[in-house]
Image (cartoon, rainbow, N blue to C red):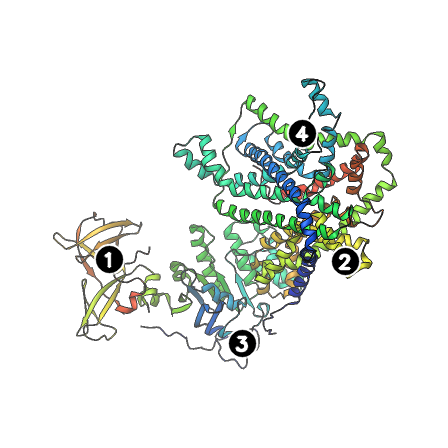
Amino acid sequence: MSTTRHQLVSPLQLVALATAGIILLPLGYVTAQALSADPAVWSRLWATRIPELLFNTVSLAGSVSVITLILGVSTAWLVTRVEFPGRRLWEGALVLPLAMPTYVLAYVFSYLLGFGGPVEHLWQLIAGPQARVFSPHSYWGATLVMALDTFPFVYLLSRSALLSMNVSFEEVARASGVSRLSTLWRVTLPLMRPSIAAGIALVILYVVSDFGAVSLLRYQTLTYAVFQQMTGRADNTAASILSLLLVVLALIFLITERWFRQRSRFYQTTGRYQAPQRRQYGWLGTIAVTGYLGLIVGAAFALPAVLLIQWSLSPEALATIDSRFFGFIWNSGILAACAATGGVLIGLPLAYLASRRPTMLNLGCLQAAYAGYVLPGPVAALAVLVLFTKLAPVVYGSVLILIVAYVIHFLPAGLQSLEPALQHMSPNLEEVARTLGLGIRATWRRVTLPLVRNGFVVAWVLMFLQTMKELPATLLLRPVGFDTLAIRVWMEASEEYFQLAAPSALLIVLLSLPALVLLVSKDWRAA
Amino acid sequence: MISDHSTAPRPSGEGTLQGNLFTPASSVLELRHVSCAYETGRPAVQGVSFAAREGEILCLLGPSGCGKTTILRAIAGFEPVRSGQLFLSGQLVSSPEVMTPTESRHVGMVFQEYALFPHLHVQDNIAFGLHHLPRSERASRVQEMLRLTGLDGFERRYPHELSGGQQQRVALARALVQNPVVLLLDEPFSNLDPDMAGRMRQELHDLLRRTKTTTVLVTHDHDEAFAMADRIAVLNQGRLEQFDTPEMMYHMPATPFVADFVGQADFIPGTVSHGIVHTELGEFPDTIDSKDGAAVVVMIRPDDIHLVPTEGARSHVLSRQFHGSENLYTVSLPSGQIVHSSQGSTSVYQVGTTVELRVLATHTVLFRQEESTNTSGPAQPTTRKH
């Protein structure tokens, strides 16, 4: 019998520590640069840009959260508590807007709402030839696009809260003589509160770090400003200061989201699950509900998708589908494959240690890997850029620097699949393998890996597809002339060449669909 | 009455796996003053010693958090030992200096949740640890286990396609097919409905006897421990309270905690004079040689108290619980002391009936007063269900 002493520091532990360090380094560097900046730069920014940018960012986040709250909760309630023909179809369709990158939706809406666009024509038929709709390049335009694109977050979390809620709570309320409506207000909604709050925090996080929509709609937010500082003025110090603000803002909402998610667990009593009773709607109700859901899904997904298809089939667009176009696909694909592979390899030791040996150190390493969450694309790009120009200027302008930025940026998305895969696997399974005479390595090979394989595949695919549609970091870090699908959409759309942008945009939407299925099916339970 | 804690190691007939020529003890499993702790300063197990003989079924019994599962995990090599020594087949496998990895210990383990590999068929689950054997031998061993556990015909099923009882049998088969030195069972029946648990208990007992498997079983249910075990180790707050046969445990509990935990018990206060304990229920012999005037408590089980309805008696029935085969009466004595009495299922007395109590004192157990005050004292008679 071989005998070992307990190991204090395993090689795996060292790998995890190194990874966490590498991920935190750029973030730390940006922070350092911001904090060590000349006070004059700070005061100049405070006097000029920051108040406006903060106001714009926060007010956009505010209006988007109100709208997503209404859309998300109402749609979730309809598909879980009401029975009407086509309910199951709508249940799935309401998630589809997540497949639309914000820059695609923004570009479609700048056509729809634009000067002389179809909505204006329609409106002028009703309100007279001088009537105008609000410009898409405005606060309201950005609000509309962001709300339509992000309400599924609130929908998904509210829906799962409604489904996992113990029906007994509502039944007890009804049995105590409380009316249906009153039960909704006094029992159902309060019980959903943590889930709704988590959804809203996610929406805000998304809005705050979005670049695609605000850049196309020319609405000044912090994220957009970081990009402009880096490209227009090549002022990395000012960009660092704005980034730091942005990171703090994002961090606040990330913590809010985590906190509410944690709390929502207490609200879901375990025990025997009972499907909620659904009220049958008559034909009048069905028409109203279908109209409402149709309007939302139509505006957020169906209509843009139809337009993209129509544009893609136009002669101008078809003419662009040549070897250059396939070159963009190849560029996108190879970048995304490298980033996804890197992400899985880096995320694995972190997730494994955190789930099997949850010491403070290991959990800390894992949390460090989630830093990508609070690094909006331009900030991740800035962080990697300033670090590499300092440490290894040779790689500047190479694909490598871009891949590093992707991995840091999208590692959280991968970890979210890796982590549960490992956590759902009871440590007893590994332990029992040990009692059956297998060593650590054999246990890994024959038990752990086969069981977490699916989580790995999902993590890889998610990171791959997220990278495919990434825009700001690619714009900032790509080698000269190295264009991807997302870049093409953005560049053509910025020039309002709607048809030319369509094939790339359509391809991105189509590729996003499987990612969406993966993302949602993880904890999807049909109502 | 205090049982011998460290059972003298006796030579086990057959030699175990390795040639253990210079063994310090020839018990299959021995713990010597073992302590374990998840955090320093808060030991989960403290100074526990016991040993299991070849083929013996041993139960670790105690309330949740008493450290019984920790002991099981220490035996399996999942938890390190802070002090003391742990021997398997006479070889030191755990001590503060030594930690033999689990895979070299040849223990079988059945987890509470069975931990069947969800990606493998039943037969592959059972054959999991037999990779070193040639294919044909592997198949025949698996077939034998399937037959032994009554799982014929299920070999191509996946774990999720099996009922709870079948899953447990697969987990058992997987552990037993290795011919483990000792089989470790963690609350094996807690995930089964009571009916199934009763049947599996019987089946498991027969199977372990037939295969002569030395077994350590963890449970919080004294009925389960009584039904399964050759000997029981009762644990409380990480310490061994008593290590004994089920019968001794029930009739001669070493501490009030054990008395209370392994069945319903009432504790009646009394005073000693001239070697006789005087209580409200009558007189009992002083078995612990107390001084005159010493305060003691007498433990009495409900089945030792007989009720006789008597006009004008000073005790009366407070309540009756019908348990099918018996009626459990709660009786108030003149002093207000509460005692319980188990009567036949046909002896039905109304609440308020005045009764005389007859105590069949074939085996009363005495504790000194201070011993019992820290657990369920005489002032608060226990209400643990039978």
Q: CA distance from mark 1 to mark 4?
A: 75 Å
Residue B227 image-quadrant placement: bottom left
- Label 2 element class: helix
Q: Amino acid at mark 2?
A: Phe
Find residue A298 and name its label.
Answer: 4
Q: Is residue B374 left or right of residue B171?
A: left
Q: Amino acid at mark 1?
A: Val
The residue that mark 3 highlights is B91
Q: CA distance from mark 4 to mark 3?
A: 73 Å
Q: Label 1 is found on which chain of the structure?
A: B
Q: Amino acid at mark 4?
A: Gly
Query: Which of the two discs, 3 and 1, labels the residue nearer the N terminus?
Result: 3
Q: Amino acid at mark 3?
A: Gln
Residue at 59 percent across and 31 percent down: it is A87
Q: Label 2 is found on which chain of the structure?
A: A
Residue at 66 percent across and 65 percent down: it is A14
In this rendering, the label closer to the viewer, 4 or 2: 2
The residue that mark 2 highlights is A388
Front-lying residue, B135 or A260: A260
Residue at mark 4 shares a chain with residue at mark 2: yes
- Label 1 element class: strand
The residue that mark 1 highlights is B339
User: Percent from the top left, x then y, of residue A471?
Assistant: 75, 44
User: Percent from the top left, x then y, of residue B154?
Assistant: 57, 51
Q: Is residue A91 above or below residue A246?
A: above
Q: Label 4 is found on which chain of the structure?
A: A
